[in-house]
Image (spheres, rainbow, N blue to C red):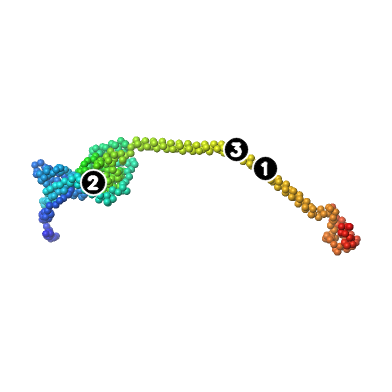
Amino acid sequence: MALETSQQAPAPVRQIANAIAGWIDRLGTVWVEGQIAQISRRPGVGTVFMTLRDTVADISVPVTCARSMFDGLNPPLVEGAGVVINARPSYYANRGTLSLYAREIKMVGLGELLARLERRRQLLAAEGLFAPELKRSLPFLPTRVGLVTAPGSAAERDVVENARRRWPAVAFEMAYAAMQGTRSAAEVMEALERLERDARVDVIIVARGGGSVEDLLPFSDEALVRAVQRMRTPVVSAIGHEPDQPLLDLVADVRASTPTDAAKLVVPDVVEEARGVAWALERIRSLVDQRVAREQSGLDAIRSRPALAAPASLLDSRLDEVGLLRSRARRTVGHHLDRAGDDLVHQLARARALSPLATLQRGYAVLQDADGHPVTTLATVRPGDALSARVADGRLHLTTDRLEPLDTLGDPDGR
């Protein structure tokens, strides 16, 4: 039944605690899945104390079991192992704590463990966390490399030594974390977040020197996978476990087979780069030399042509043509002038032939009256009139004595 309380009638703490204990006792036996975070076996005590941790949420609960049952487990139970426990929950009212009393413990076998990891992989892949288009490219030469690993580990030594051997000036920003055990995933996430906040870090390496599937379970933690997917800084996974890939390898931007391989992927080799630069310079020089030689050959071919070998020859031939054209022009103009002169002479002769003066020079005269009008008929003249006759070299003044019509003179030609 529900506990009835009010502001005026509150329940004491002990009553609330006892009520919680009663409700939990009525829960009965339950099956619980989790990860063993801590094991405490005290000498001379018939009970083993453990801590069971949720694999996703940051929740843990104490677990106790009989020592005889714990010692009878095969294989032995170790910290970090995934288990399924049949237990009865108990609430200790005096301390206000919840605990589980284990009646049966079944460790999750490797096959089942891998099957669960595969289901988790499929779920996260369906969400698009492993999509290739989300992968970030590594910088060519990082100024500072973030390294997440265990302090003093062989993985740290392999990464640092190989990286500095390849590029002595490379700088590292260390972020140490447990690489095995129940706190590993949480500490790795904390280290990644710290390096993510450091603007100097260009790339982050998560390194561990391999291990069993059980040892590498933290690197398949769903919370860790999602944290890496949200990061802006490129992440290199160097867990070093070839047969079975932790999910971190799938979500990371680059996967390295070993910590040494991670150093080679992140940091370029100064010797190889210097050799590449030298080769590039030699290649450039060769191409430039070839281009210059090709252009020089083209210039030589152009200069060897007669037009450029002896440019004056073109002018000489043109000068000859100009001389010929000038002579031809002069001849043409002379011919035109000669024809024009002949035409002028002919026209002058014709004009002279038609001129009255030329008629007068042939013996003719022009007869005019006193007013200067030409006399063309006898009707305009009377005997005694004064007339004048215009001849070739002067004028004659005449007086009319008599008039003789043409019919009395006979033939006009004087016959």
Tag 2 secondary structure: helix
- Furthest-right residue in this view: 401
Q: Which residue is mark 3?
A: 313
Q: Is residue 322 above or below residue 402?
A: above
Q: Is residue 140 left or right of residue 325?
A: left
Residue bearing mark 1? 327
State which quarter of the image contains the N terminus.
Answer: bottom left
Secondary structure type for disc 3: helix
Amino acid at the residue labelled 3: Ser
- Cα separation, mark 1 vs mark 3, equals 21 Å
Q: Are the two marked residues, 2 and 1, in contact with CB atoms closer than 8 angstroms?
A: no
Q: Are marks 1 and 3 in contact (CB under 8 Å)?
A: no
Q: Where residue 274 sits: x, y (%)?
A: 36, 36
Which amino acid, mark 2?
Ser
Mark 1: which amino acid? Ser
Q: Report the front residue among 280 and 267.
A: 280
According to the picture, the residue beneath numbered tag 2 turns out to be 220
Q: What residue lies at 76% left-to-right and 51% top-to-bottom? A: 347
Q: Is residue 185 at all visible to an observer of this figure?
A: no
Quadrant in which the C terminus appears:
bottom right
- Tell which circle, 3 or 2, labels the residue nearer the N-terminal end: 2
The CA distance from mark 3 to mark 2 is 89 Å
Disc 2: CA contacts within 10 A as few (<14), some (14-19) or many (>=20): many
For label 1, the SS is: helix
Residue drawn at (49%, 38%) of the image: 295
Between the residue at mark 2 and the residue at mark 1, the CA separation in whole angstroms equals: 105 Å
Q: Residue furthest bottom?
A: 379
